Amino acid sequence: MEKVSRDKRENNINYQPEMHVRDVNSREIFKNDLLTSQFLRNYTNIPLLSNVMPEDIEDVSQKYQAFLGVEYEADTIKKVYIRSTDGTIEKEVYVLSLIEHKSEIDYDVAMQLFRYMSVIWQDYKATQNKKHKGVSASADFRYPLIIPIVYYEGKKEWTAGLHLKDRIDFSEEMIEYIPDFTYQVVSLNKYTNEELSKKHDEMSLVMLINKIQSSEDTKEFQKVSETMVDSIYVNAPDEIKEIYKKILWSLLMKMKVPSENARELMGGIGGRGMGYLFENMEEIDIGAQKRNTAREKQRAEAERQRADEEKQRADEEKQRADEEKQRADEEKQRADEEKQRADEEKQLKIEAEERANALEEEVQRLRKLLKSQEQK
């Protein structure tokens, strides 16, 4: 593929990274009604949603986050209008989407969904009672259907229980007393690149890009039809092109591509389309690998330096311990020598006392002998 000229690329380098988040929140994707409708139609396998169009979707997330708090800002709540064959609205249902980017699975998702559902139903009841006083107490009053979905981008298998009862104690023995529902997991990595390519819609390109989480994923992405990807990008509405740019910028930042190179690449995409990404993907991947290798080498060198310092400290501690032992041995030797001298002096004193006693006894004997001689 012929490279675009430097001048042409420079004319298109107007992508300002500071105007885009470094890590795209998936709620940005699900804010878009076209992407949401494609997701519900083509990726959830729920017959009731098989004909949903963008105009059938109303985002009501902000209304319920006022009840639930900032920790739920990444999640979306959609009111979806189900139409009859003549286009008239028959029912409205709620689709509750939780976004899980993390590789670690949140095992409390079912309870989090249940909290959402309770708030939605309580609000629905209050709204209907304002319209028709006491209507919720009537026999034919029904709460709206809520379809809970988890969009999961992690590589690990989803192992959290799919039922609320899985989080409740005594769920087997007392099951008739436990509220329950199941939720659907749409796992990004359950789809192959080939399967996503066959979908050939704007959402499929979002998912193809979001699947890139490693060097191996980069190589797999390069096998995807460049013509297909470029076709989706070129024909996408401007607001979805902006979402693609944000996703790509986030990807480049995660791959540790320098901002200058990333900005140039984004400008190239603006001028040439997604084909420019394919032209440079291998170079980007190699650059990322080199940076990863350099970081690993730097970490290894730092670890080696820390190990050397630890060894030096250990050697110094051992030397100090040896010196302390030597001093202790010398002190003991001096103490032993002092004791030996004291013992020798004691022995000499005993011997001197014994000689003095013996001499005294000899003097007494001689005196007795002399006295005896004098008496004779």
Image (cartoon, grey):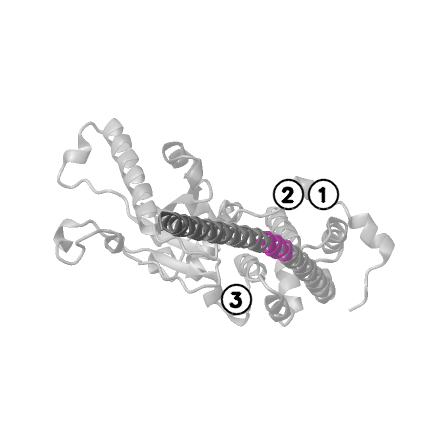
- Secondary structure beneath disc 1? loop
Query: To which residue does mark 1 refer?
Result: 16
Query: To which residue does mark 3 refer?
Result: 196
Q: Main secondary structure of the magenta part?
A: helix
**Magenta-highlighted residues:** 313-327
- Secondary structure beneath disc 2? loop
The reply to whether discs 1 and 2 touch (Cβ–Cβ < 8 Å) is yes
Q: Residue at x 28, y 40 (%)?
A: 118
Amino acid carrying mark 3 in the image? Leu
In the picture shown, does residue 289 fall above or below 35?
Answer: below
Categorize mark 3 by other alpha carbons within 10 Å: few (<14), some (14-19), many (20+): some
> What is the x, y in percent for residue 24?
57, 48
Magenta-span inclusion, residue 143: no
User: Looking at the image, which is closer to me, 237 or 156?
Assistant: 156
Amino acid carrying mark 2 in the image? His
Magenta-span inclusion, residue 324: yes
Residue 365 in the figure: left or right of residue 329 = left
User: Looking at the image, which is closer to me, 128 or 323?
Assistant: 323
